[in-house]
Image: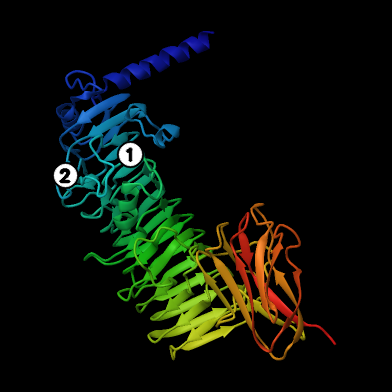
Amino acid sequence: MRYLLVCLITALCVATASATDSRLIDVTQPPYNAVGDGATDCSKAFQDALHAAGEGDDGGVVFVPRGQFLISEPLRMRPNTALRGVWTYPPNSPQFWPPFEEKALPGSVLLVTAGEGDEDGPPFITIHASCAIEGLVIYYPKQVKENPPKPYAWTVQITEGGADHCTIRNVLMVNPYKAVDFGTHPSGRHFIENLYAYPLYRGLYIDKCYDIGRVSNVHFWPFWGYTGDDDPVGRFVTDHAEAFIIGRTDWEYFNNCFAIFYHVGFRFVNRGAGGGNVLLTQSGADICPYAVLVEEVQGHSGVSFSNSQIFGRVTVKDTNAGPVRFTGCGFFGATREPEPRDPIHCEIAGAGHVSFENCHFITLDPKNTAKTSILAAGGGLSVSNCLFMDVGRVHFDLRPGLRTAVIVGNTFQGVMVMRDTSEANVQAGLNADQRAPKEPDSLTVDNLDEGDGFSTDGAWYLGKAGGDYRGVVHWAEAGDGEATATWRVNLPQAGDYTVSVWYGADPFSDRATDAPYTVRHAAGEETIRINQREHSGQWVELGTFRFEAGSAVVTLSNAANGNVLADAVRWVPVAK
């Protein structure tokens, strides 16, 4: 008991000393007297407290207790100071999803009206060397859910002339127009951790970092009133906004960083100071028209993604001369395209070398317009030990401008297709693709066959059901017959043929039980309805029909009670 009493007295003494320490300033206490009622303008109270905390060489901390503090003027921090709220992690709870409620914002909340309508004005918070912003919620109550939204200046920006050792930790920025600028002015050895935000135009900008910077657990996603594809703010973000913009940085470590629905996920630029040297692990861009856009990286080191997810287009511009590496990454197509696009997923130009190692590519374009996985028209290309699961019709399109290419040891679910007009030194070998089964005396048309053998009308998508004839299937949602798939074969002679169809599994129990296949034969045409929930991964007979020599046709429509799969059709002559 005596021991517990001593511990309690000691703790009280420490707390009292901290509360009276001149280096720890509570912004709500005299002489500052900020009021967290959401209506009283606290600009002067915050600025005076920050000024006082920065006096002397040892710096200080401005503490922001729970409440909603309205701030109408920009704030400036002195060196060696911290602006600290109550959070030791960024708050994240259901109240941040629609319908968004301002009154539900928890903790130390800064309601910002400073910089309204002036994108190029002074930032909300200017930070100096060895400054930190921690444990806060920052919200712009006058922002509008329109396209375009209202412009504001940067929320946080490094001071003119630059500042090293700056930190942002455990901060939630609800709806900044531009979030964090660590690039307009130099900022070495910065540290950004646990930043959650929905930036509407620019997210995190890094440039002029002449010594190693670190960025960890940054998450940009549309929690502020997002209402789907018809959301006006979301449409602006997908058409114009950029999540991560990275220029000159002499080593930058990114870890667990993510962005979704941005026009550009990760953009690498040279804005006068040179390109970057960036290592990114366990990071990703999801549903971004440009998941990765490389304009320039450092020539000796470049950028390297490892164990990351890249959902959207990858573009390396002709201005780039440095290496770009993807190791252990997954590639998926974006579903929110803002303008007509060429049917290409990875497009490579410039003088640098781009490599893909131990990656997988799946559903490069869910809208089924992608015809090319990787187009290379510059520098060098290496692709090794990658898995191409359900890709477009051309895996590699090698064009003039390419200097070298090594394509070795890859696996294809479907037949590997490479077009080479490059005149480059191309080494390709030990690649294994999934060939069609050998079936003597039969004629088979698969949905991956080039030419006129297979065609679609209406909305069809590429997918992988499992047990598909060559690893890839087309599918359409149930409808009224507006989507059709057609198989055509040239029969060498007239006679009776048994017609069979192949389709994959039903992993989601949403396949049609009455998929209508129509066979056009010598006596006319006949529609046979097939239960695609049964007998998957094998040939299912439609029947035996008489055909004239020449073209024979089978058609499948989506006039069914579930999704329909269009995979392969086989004609087998009946022995006389």
Mark 2 and mark 1: Cα distance apart in space:
17 Å
* Mark 2 crowd level (few <14, some 14–19, many ≥20, 10 Å Cα): some
Query: Tag on residue 174?
Result: 1
Residue 120 placed where, x, y %?
Answer: 15, 50
Residue at the image position 84 percent from the left and 85 percent from the top: 575
**SS class, disc 2:** loop
Which numbered disc, 2 or 1, marks the residue that appears first in the sequence? 2
Residue at the image position 33 percent from the left and 36 percent from the top: 134
Residue 478 placed where, x, y %?
Answer: 58, 56
Would you say 554 lies left or right of 295 here?
right
In the image, farthest residue toward the right? 576
Would you say 183 lies left or right of 224 here?
left
* Mark 1 crowd level (few <14, some 14–19, many ≥20, 10 Å Cα): many
**To which quarter of the image does residue 409 belong?**
bottom right
Residue 378 placed where, x, y %?
Answer: 38, 81
* Residue indicated by mark 2: 117
Q: Amino acid at mark 2?
A: Gly
Please state which of residues 553 and 452 is positioned toward the viewer in this rendering: 553
**SS class, disc 1:** loop
